[in-house]
Image: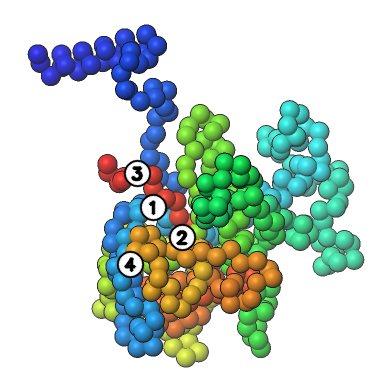
Amino acid sequence: MTKHSRYFLVGLVCLLAACNGGYNGQLLGSLDRPEWNTIIPYGMVYIPSGTLHIGQSDQDINNALIQKPKSISIQGFFMDETEISNNEYRQFVEFVRDSIAHKILGGDYLNPDNDAVEWREKIDWEDPDIQDQLSSMYTPENQRILGRKEINTRILNYVYYWVDFKEAARDVNRNNPDYDRSQVIKSELVNVYPDTLCWVHDFTYSYNEPMTRNYFWHPAFDNYPVVGIKWKQAMAFSKWRTRFWNDFRVQIGDVINDEFRLPYEAEWEYAARGGRDISPYPWGGPYMRNSKGCILANFKPGRGDYPDDGGFYTVKVDAYFPNDYGLYNMAGNVSEWTSTAFNENAYQFEWDLDPNMEYNAQDSDPITLKRKVIRGGSWKDIAYYCQTGVRNYEYQDSSKAYVGFRDVLTFLGRSIND
């Protein structure tokens, strides 16, 4: 029997089985499973699974005593090739704004079957009648600057939901047949508008008012990293992005993907190294300049010398050369939020398989429990903080002019080439 004949016979058997109840007593698995094809989301790059030696990349006697190097394994994932830009985050803000407006307008702006937002009905924000109907969304007249009618950003709130799998996995819960799993479904109400005042708040006796007035909304800064974002705002963006992506896939009859999320700390370091395991910087070299003397990242090159690297504050998200994974600005520009809670000696007790320590701090918790790891250094930092192995933190309820973020998406499967 030839090879082609065998293929024909197997296909005929499967066809007959499907026509006759689908199984004919054979173990064939469920026959109505949807097809799955890997799609690289727009603006992301693939990071393959691998091994990483975490810890200091350079001599640091104090930190080496508590952050001892160790070997870990990281599952493959997709990562944004750039930090989330002002214009990308603005899409989220406008989504929240338009959702609120649709609810207020009602009628054709809502789906009559379920009162969901009818996105096919566009809102003409320049129409005086529409503005009158949406008057509650604008700042009161006595609070307007030079009479400008502006959206009251304090009403731009978004609710996101998440499942506390660690709580659900406790023996007292997972072995209880009567357990109500709604108890592990959590929600957060978050105001999504960036803290534009961070440019003034973060730097005493410094003239940064032009950045407060222009940085988030002016088109000159569209392709610059969004800043003034609290940790929960970054989380809310990731949850919204997931819903936005998966709603579309459901509409076209495709299978939904896993969630967009903040990278955990080890994942971020693994991506930043770009396959150069021991190198202190994403480009592999031991210095912040190349052999021609050109600076390779946006940071603070010298005392009081911010513009020597080509950028005064932040620079565009795709400035400088990417690392070997195709990721831009993994050193400098803005430090980036991770999902990991900061603990000085976490390396001592974390697992060596996708290590991560999470703690969902409440508003009433002590301030030390609100520390979240940030990585990469920023435009205002010295070179030390730009090293791939250096850990730092900010408080989750703080918003800074030098902290942004990017998302990741876990790859489902062994390898993209499998």
Relative image position of residue 374 (x, y in whole percent) = 49, 71
Front: mark 3 or 1: 3
Question: How far apart are labels 4 and 2 at the CA level?
Answer: 14 Å
Q: Of helix, strand and loop, which one carries label 3?
A: loop
Q: Amino acid at mark 4?
A: Arg
Residue 110, quarter of picture: top right
Reading the image, the residue beneath label 3 is 413
Question: How far apart are labels 1 and 2 at the CA level?
Answer: 10 Å
Question: How far apart are labels 3 and 1 at the CA level?
Answer: 10 Å
Reading the image, the residue beneath label 1 is 77
Tags 1 and 2 in contact by the CB under 8 Å rule? yes
Reading the image, the residue beneath label 2 is 263
Front: mark 4 or 2: 2
Image disc number at residue 273: 4
Q: Residue at x 84, y 65 (%)?
A: 144
Q: Upstream in the sequence, badge 4 or badge 2? A: 2
Q: Upstream in the sequence, badge 1 or badge 4? A: 1
Whether residue 33 is visible here, answered yes or no, is yes
Q: Residue at x 69, y 70 (%)?
A: 364
